[in-house]
Image (cartoon, rainbow, N blue to C red):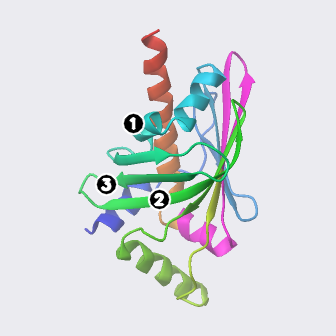
Amino acid sequence: MSAANAMAAAMNGRDKDEGPNTNQIDSPGRALRLRRQIAAPRELVYAAWADPKQMGQWYGPTGFTCPLSEGDVRVGGAWRLTMRSPSGEDYPLTGTYVEIDPPRKLVIDISLENHPPEWHEMIRQYRIKLGESPDSPEGLVRMAVELEERDGGTWLTVTDMFTTVSERDAHRELGAVEGWSQTIDRLAQHVAQLLAQR
């Protein structure tokens, strides 16, 4: 199995869970949105997103690591992160900080253009299946992280806004739902460990 297929397989799964500490996912319009209550103060959860060093400790699906995680955390500043699969395949992300409002909101425009050729071929095949132009460039993904104090913890909403509905659907089919679920599970574990060290 190729690394790209392994990533898709690892991230393919449930759509929505119910409960206070589970991931709730929907996909309105061009968006893929995940919500979750995290049992930690909002400032701690925000720092886990805004501090590139921390983000590199938890970002990505189960079994993935981040050998590179850096950012110039200011509006217009550059952001770079590379996810590495358990089989060693790298998935580089580059982006720009669009909005920074601590500890409420963080928005980054993200490009996937440096992902492996196998990943882009999967997107291309999905477009063919939909009858769209297979060679259209993949647009930016705008990732918005919103944090609200609620019930003694933090209500987290992560929204990925895609250029087109078909791009959103391709990412869903290729495992983005499960990938985000696993990533937010890792975030919750990360901040729980920070709380335990206080």
At a point 37% along the width and 48% down the height, the residue shown is 68
Q: Residues within 10 Å of mark 1 (few under 14, many from 20)?
A: some
Q: Is residue 60 visible?
A: no
Please state which amino acid type lies under the numbered disc 2: Leu
Q: Is residue 132 visible?
A: yes
Please provide percent x and percent y for residue 111.
Answer: 54, 65
> What is the secondary structure assignment of the residue under circle 3?
loop
Q: Nearer the viewer, residue 159 or 24?
A: 159
Gap between marks 2 and 1 measured at Cα: 15 Å
Q: How many marks?
A: 3
**Does the segment drawn in magenta span residue 154?**
yes
> What is the secondary structure assignment of the residue under circle 1?
helix
Q: In this picture, which residue range is highlighted in magenta? A: 144-172
Judging by the rendered image, the residue that carries numbered circle 1 is 57
Please state which amino acid type lies under the numbered disc 1: Gln
Q: Nearer the viewer, residue 88 or 168?
A: 88
At a point 48% along the width and 39% down the height, the residue shown is 52
Q: Are marks 2 and 1 in contact (CB under 8 Å)?
A: no
Instruction: Decide if residue 19 is on the left or right side of residue 134.
Output: right
Judging by the rendered image, the residue that carries numbered circle 3 is 85
Say above or below: 133 vs 14: below
At a point 47% along the width and 53% down the height, the residue shown is 80
Counting residues from the N terminus, which is met first, the one under dot 3 or under dot 1?
1
Please provide percent x and percent y for residue 49.
Answer: 55, 37
Judging by the rendered image, the residue that carries numbered circle 2 is 93
Gap between marks 3 and 2 measured at Cα: 14 Å
Say above or below: 91 vs 103: below
Q: Residues within 10 Å of mark 3 (few under 14, many from 20)?
A: many
Q: Residues within 10 Å of mark 2 (few under 14, many from 20)?
A: some
Question: Image quadrant of residue 7?
Answer: bottom left
